[in-house]
Image (cartoon, rainbow, N blue to C red):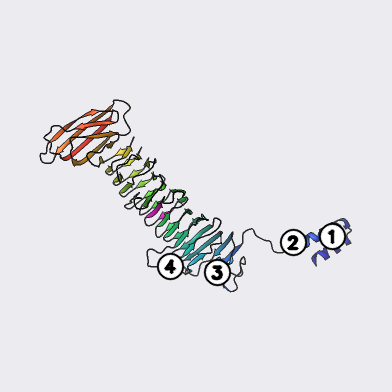
Amino acid sequence: MYIAAFRRALQQIGLGPLYDALLALEPALAGISATPTSPITVTYVAPNGSDTTGTRGNIFKPFLTVQAALLAVVSGDVIDIAPAGPPGTRYAENLVVPAGLLDVTLRGPAEISPATGVALTYTPTGARGILNIDDVTIKTRDPNPAINAVAVTGTASADPEVYIKDSTIGRSKFTDLVFATLDGVETVAPPVFINNQDVFVGACFIEGTMSVTYDDAVATRPRGDSSVVMSTLNAGVELVGEPVFLADQATRIEQGAVLAIDATALGITAARAPDITINGSVTGPCVFAFRKTTGASRNVLDLTGAEFFDTVTVSVNAADVNRAQVTADNTVLRGTVTVGESVDLEASNASISQPIVGVGSGAANRPIPDFVNTSLLLPFPTSYAVAISPPMIDANYQVAVTATDVATPVAFVVAGSQTTTGYDVAAEPTLFTGVGKCDSSVVRN
């Protein structure tokens, strides 16, 4: 109607050429839809919605439940979830993201919190699935502590990507080849990462002990990197198996943090070893219990620039030619540091408040780094070796060993002969009963 009136007006004022141009455009104009199509369809969920009349992409016809919306959308869609009602109101749903839904975004602000069971489960199949969670609280009120709020599992054919941003999440579990990114997330229970591709935790507050496990029982399984940046791990982190883990200098690991690397029960087959970097501050005691590696790899522990307020223990669970390499350059160590056998420690320019204690059998080589005192409780043998790590490249090392007899509280100075890799120490006098304390001090001039 409006185009016909416009034509008549043009004819009356003599603009015939413009009329002819409009006439030529008429077929094209007729093909234009009155409703533009968005490249991303947004579907809505609201407390006044209806799962009967709810329609994908129609703001005037929202769904009542998030699950109904998940069943209606297609890959690439966004689900906008309005608050379920007044503060404290929640969507009490056990969400299951369809396995064939390979790209979906849940966007709040809203809370999803069922009374029992898992709040959100996603196990995609086929191509890699992508799950985005933005400004959504996902928890479960299930009293069973083993129930997860979020559970994402990869498969042989799918490596899902999970991005959680500016949200609050309960206990979550990401298993098998999942790319997991937590950005600005606050957890109310610890996340668990098992055999994942890459894990990134940035600007997050993690309540409970975060767990990262890499089990190389499948030799072909790729090993991802786990990074924690500018975050607070309120109850520490547990590292299991052979993970690659980094906590940057801006990360705080608090409240009795225990960092344990123990793969003795995992049935690991490939020649890999943990590669652990802790550059932030740690307030609780730390235990790095490395397993005995079976291949050419070395256990690597980098503590450069970190600050430890409590005790630190580094050990390998058996004597091993594949030693653990510990770097603690410019590190602040305020508590006692205990170094076990098969551990090489480099602590250049470190601030060491307490002695570094060497622990092991009397017959084994003792790794002693620069500027370090070690104490060894043992039945003192006829002789034992004090190993220098790294090996001496000159003759500027000095060693002093003092043995204290338990029965006779007299200190005996022990003589030593220098080699390029350490000292062969013999007990003098021979009256030493063999039960007591042996202190070794190695200094490079």
The label nearer to you, 4 versus 1, is 4
Q: Is residue 10 left or right of residue 76?
A: right
Label 3, label 4: how far apart the Cα atoms are: 18 Å
Residue 5 image position (x, y, % from top left): 83, 65
The label nearer to you, 4 versus 2, is 4
Task: State the residue in front, 159 or 297.
Answer: 297
The label nearer to you, 1 versus 2, is 2
Label 4, label 2: how far apart the Cα atoms are: 49 Å
Q: Residues within 10 Å of mark 1 (few under 14, many from 20)?
A: few
Give the amino acid type for the residue marked by disc 4 in the picture.
Gly
Q: Secondary structure at mark 3?
A: helix
Magenta-span inclusion, residue 209: yes
Q: Label 4, on which residue?
A: 117
Q: Mark 3 vs mark 4: which is more N-terminal?
A: 3
Q: Secondary structure at mark 2?
A: loop
The magenta stretch spans which residues? 204-221
Q: Mark 4 vs mark 1: which is more N-terminal?
A: 1
Residue 422 image position (x, y, % from top left): 27, 31
Q: Mark 4 vs mark 2: which is more N-terminal?
A: 2
Label 3, label 1: how far apart the Cα atoms are: 47 Å
Residue 444 image position (x, y, % from top left): 29, 29
Q: Mark 1 vs mark 2: which is more N-terminal?
A: 1
Give the amino acid type for the residue marked by disc 1 in the picture.
Leu
Task: State the residue in front, 355 or 89.
Answer: 355
One can see residue 259 in this view: no
Q: Residues within 10 Å of mark 3 (few under 14, many from 20)?
A: some
Q: Label 3, on which residue?
A: 68
What residue appears at the point 17 percent right and 35 percent down from the top-left corner?
A: 382
Hey, which quadrant is residue 275 in on the image? top left
Q: Identify the disc placed on residue 23.
A: 1
Most common secondary structure along the magenta stretch: loop
Q: Identify the disc placed on residue 32.
A: 2
